[in-house]
């Protein structure tokens, strides 16, 4: 009887470590940003914030992160990515601690700006590391696993944070993030190898000339334009999600953590499956499917009124399946845009564009929705849903041309882009 050959490993043990550590890193970064949404109802009531002020608290992080990413972008291809990652991660931890210590609106606003300055650069460095260490044909799977940090923040981080926020205070979740982030930083320091092969590819020693070339290259500008619209959806809807659930859907504040728990479990199961499917059937194909599904669910969800809790569970979960498909497939697609020597700078500028566009979208959303009184329903929320649906349709078209361009430069007959 013939013995079958052992199945070849897709990832080396070290690559598995990188995936795990970047997933935990993503967990802390995403949790720091996402926790503001479920804490929105607590913050608006305890600090007496208007929707407009809360919108600025959320967008201040995004805008400062965007500016920071842009200022750092010319230098990100000039240093070992591990050292850069550690520098900005330490700043992020300090900023998150300041958020937990914030006694009022002004202090919290400044703390979010500080956190954004450091946190905004981390994601771009992490994605540059992924692009350096993993070939295009498996990046869908890598993104699928790393995006589990997004789901895990909903399954573990947000429910636990909300539980203690309800019993101890809204400050607790930020202290929890600090406690989780410190061991992650230590593991990166001790076990991650230097990521510096890109240094030998550099031709210009002037970081500003390097940046100028990146932002004037047509291929890269197409990627940045797509990112602007990709950022609109999440940044418009997410910050007001908890306030909408409580005031419009009739969800008790004590049940908020259950919504994030259920949605997170669904996203965690779906993430790796979607990532694998994007590598097998084509990243753009998955993006289109996820986008169409998102449009349907966003419009449905934003027009809901008071409904049973199980309806909120189902609607949220189905909506996030579409969102997860869009995030994974678009991230994998965009990773194929830059040349190896430009990855760090491209990712930094792309992150900057994402944060600034998202910050502006959040501020605009804060102008659109309003409350007549502190406990009244949010008005005009369906308008946000229609705006998000419109930008999603445009993004499908933009990503089509981006996908064609990537296919010309990175053909992959067995593993479609």
Image: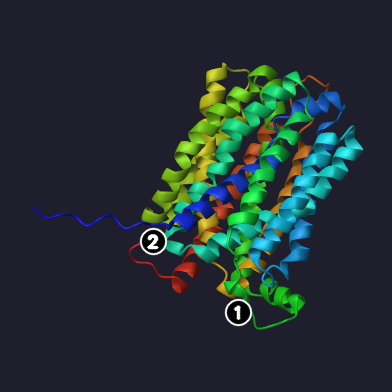
Placement of the C terminus among the 4 image quadrants: bottom left
Q: Judge from the rendering whether residue 250 lies leftward or rightward of residue 331; answer left or right.
A: right
- Mark 2 residue element: loop
How many residues crowd around disc 2 within 10 Å: few (fewer than 14), some, or many (20 or more)?
some
What is the quadrant of residue 168 in the picture?
top right
Q: Nearer the viewer, residue 348 or 406?
A: 348
Q: Position of residue 125 (x, y in %)?
A: 64, 60
Residue furthest toward the front? 190
Q: Residues within 10 Å of mark 1 (few under 14, many from 20)?
A: few
Residue 352 seen? yes
Secondary element at tag 1: helix
Rendering colour mode:
rainbow
Contact check, label 2 and label 1, Cβ < 8 Å:
no
Alpha carbons under labels 2 and 1: distance apart: 30 Å
Vertical order, 222 against 376 (above or below): below
Name the residue tied to disc 2.
Answer: 416
Kindly report which numbered mark, 2 or 1, lies closer to the viewer in this rendering: 1
User: Which numbered dot is residue 314?
Assistant: none
Q: Quadrant of residue 246?
A: top right
The residue beneath circle 1 is 200
Residue 21 in the image: x percent, y percent?
57, 50
Residue lying at 67% horizontally and 73% vertically, measured from the top left = 214
């Amino acid at each position: 009887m013939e013995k079958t050959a052992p199945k070849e490993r897709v990832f080396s043990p070290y690559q598995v470590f990188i995936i795990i550590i970047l997933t935990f890193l993503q967990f802390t970064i995403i949790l720091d940003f996402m926790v503001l949404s479920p804490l929105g109802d607590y913050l608006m009531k305890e600090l007496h914030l208007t929707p407009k002020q809360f919108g600025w608290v959320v967008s201040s992080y995004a805008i400062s992160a965007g500016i920071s990413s842009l200022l750092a972008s010319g230098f990100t291809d000039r240093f070992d990515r591990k050292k850069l990652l550690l520098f900005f991660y330490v700043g992020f931890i300090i900023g998150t601690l300041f958020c937990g210590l914030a006694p009022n609106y002004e202090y919290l606003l400044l703390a979010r700006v500080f956190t954004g300055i450091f946190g905004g650069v981390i994601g771009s460095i992490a994605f540059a590391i992924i692009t350096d260490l993993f070939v295009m044909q498996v990046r869908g799977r890598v993104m699928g696993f790393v995006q589990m940090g997004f789901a895990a923040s909903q399954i573990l981080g947000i429910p636990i944070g909300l539980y203690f926020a309800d019993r101890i205070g809204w400050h607790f979740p930020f202290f929890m993030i600090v406690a989780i982030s410190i061991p992650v930083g230590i593991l990166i320091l001790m076990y991650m190898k230097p990521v510096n092969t890109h240094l030998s590819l550099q031709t210009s020693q002037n970081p500003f000339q390097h940046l100028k070339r990146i932002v004037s290259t047509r291929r890269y500008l197409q990627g940045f334009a797509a990112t602007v619209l990709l950022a609109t959806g999440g940044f418009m809807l997410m910050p007001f999600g908890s306030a909408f659930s409580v005031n419009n859907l009739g969800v008790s504040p004590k049940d908020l953590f259950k919504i994030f728990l259920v949605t997170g479990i669904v996203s965690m199961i779906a993430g790796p499956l979607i990532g694998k499917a994007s590598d097998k059937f084509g990243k753009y194909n998955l993006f289109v499917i996820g986008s169409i599904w998102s449009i349907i669910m966003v419009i449905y969800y934003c027009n809901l009124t008071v409904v049973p809790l199980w309806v909120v569970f189902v609607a949220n979960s189905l909506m996030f399946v579409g969102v997860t498909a869009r995030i994974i497939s678009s991230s994998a697609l965009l990773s194929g845009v830059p040349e190896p020597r430009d990855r760090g700078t491209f990712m930094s500028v792309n992150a900057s564009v994402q944060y600034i566009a998202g910050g502006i979208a959040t501020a605009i959303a804060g102008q659109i929705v309003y409350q007549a009184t502190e406990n009244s329903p949010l008005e005009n929320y369906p308008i946000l849903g229609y705006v998000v649906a419109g930008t999603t349709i445009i993004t499908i078209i933009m990503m089509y041309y981006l996908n064609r361009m990537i296919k010309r430069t990175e053909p992959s007959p067995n593993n479609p882009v």
